[in-house]
Amino acid sequence: MPHLPDAVLWSIPAFVLLTAIEMVSYRLRPDEDAAGYGAKDAATSVTMGIGSVFFDLLWKIPIVAIYTALYELTPLRVPVLWWTLPLMLLAQDFLYYWSHRGHHVVRVLWACHVVHHSSEKFNLTTALRQPWTSLTVWPFYVPLVLCGVHPAAVAFLSGVNLVYQFWVHTERVGKLPRPIECVFNTASHHRVHHASQGGYLDRNFGGILIVWDRMFGSFVAETERPVYGLTKNIHTYNPLRVATHEYAAIGRDLAAAADWRERAGLLFRGPGWQPQRRRAAHVADGAARPDPVATRAADAAPPAPPPPAADPQPVAEPGRPVAEPGRRVKRAA
């Protein structure tokens, strides 16, 4: 078994130091357009991060058992050497891309990952806002184990990927030189990923490399300033609700589903998917009900002025034709 360090544990002092520097930078050079820091929001993010450490220890028990069984079954072995680690990290980052993308487009997976997107701020503490239900991640790395990568090496590679992504959660770093922006995931690329605008939604899934997004059509460059959070924000700092709100929403939808086909769609289709009957009912309900904002605006508006009186029709003089509007009439010779 390879003896590899816990990359996340060893990086905690750097996390604390960089977060403190970022906080001070906002004090010394405030940016009114940046999302910045909020005390309650930052406390929630840190709480979610601490909680994820304890829950991950719980989930690791069955995951390690499965990975170990699969590792014993495969005849392949990849040694942990100075030159194999970069190749293994490249493979892990490729699988991370598909895991990350899957957790955005499958609702039951999104229920786990939505925690990370629930903050309306974007700073280094946002990187710590991790889910407590990461049991949905492990299947994406099974190919790595089957190729002969030791489960301990898989854990180390995942930690390295997570540590790299810490620094990209900031608005204090602008765009970097073009070669770096073309290859690596940067703060600019990741701001797009956390944005809630329509053109930015479900883009830039890369962990360390952004080349996967460029290859598979999910890349968007940062142009307009992002608006962070969810398309429908939850407006809470309660860690338990942050961790479970989407699971609760899924439970309500499943209880109201008409059949198993609808239930399957609510679980495995996109987060915004609804059965056809609900969409039709929503459209009909929206058409039947007047818009309350528009109604209030109409009630408050002053009465419309009466329409202007129509211009009197010209009366023809004897021997002279009547001129039509916009047309000249020749005089009689």
Image (spheres, grey):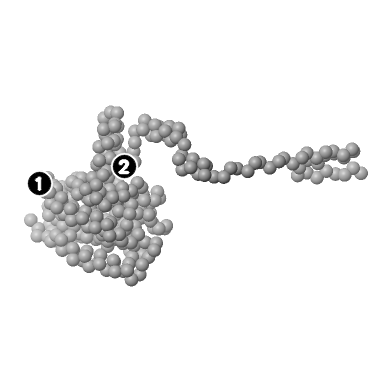
- In percent of the image, x 32 and y 41: which residue is there? 270
Where does the image place residue 240, in percent across and percent down from the top left? 21, 48
Task: Tell me which label, 1 or 2, sits earlier in the chain.
Answer: 1
Horizontal side of 276 relative to 154 (left or right) equals: right
Which quadrant does the N terminus fall into?
bottom left
Where does the image place residue 185, in percent across and percent down from the top left? 30, 59
Residue located beneath label 1 in the image: 65
Q: Which mark is residue 251?
A: none
- In percent of the image, x 28 and y 66: which residue is there? 23
- The residue nearer to you, when weighing 55 against 201, is 55
* Residue most extreme to the bottom: 28
Q: The disc labelled 2 sits on which kind of residue?
A: Pro
- Occupied quadrant, residue 262: top left
Residue located beneath label 2 in the image: 271
Horizontal side of 225 relative to 2 (left or right) equals: right
Q: Note whether residue 276 is visible.
A: no
- The residue nearer to you, when weighing 39 against 200, is 39
Q: Residues within 10 Å of mark 2 (few under 14, many from 20)?
A: many
Where does the image place residue 69, in percent across and percent down from the top left? 9, 45
- The residue nearer to you, when weighing 261 against 219, is 261
- In percent of the image, x 33 and y 71: which residue is there? 28
| Alpha carbon distance from label 1 to label 2 | 31 Å
Tell me the SS state at disc 1: helix
Horizontal side of 233 relative to 316 (left or right) equals: left
Q: The disc labelled 1 sits on which kind of residue?
A: Ala
Indicate whether 197 appears above or below 262: below
- The residue nearer to you, when weighing 64 against 236, is 236
Where does the image place residue 12, in percent across and percent down from the top left? 18, 63
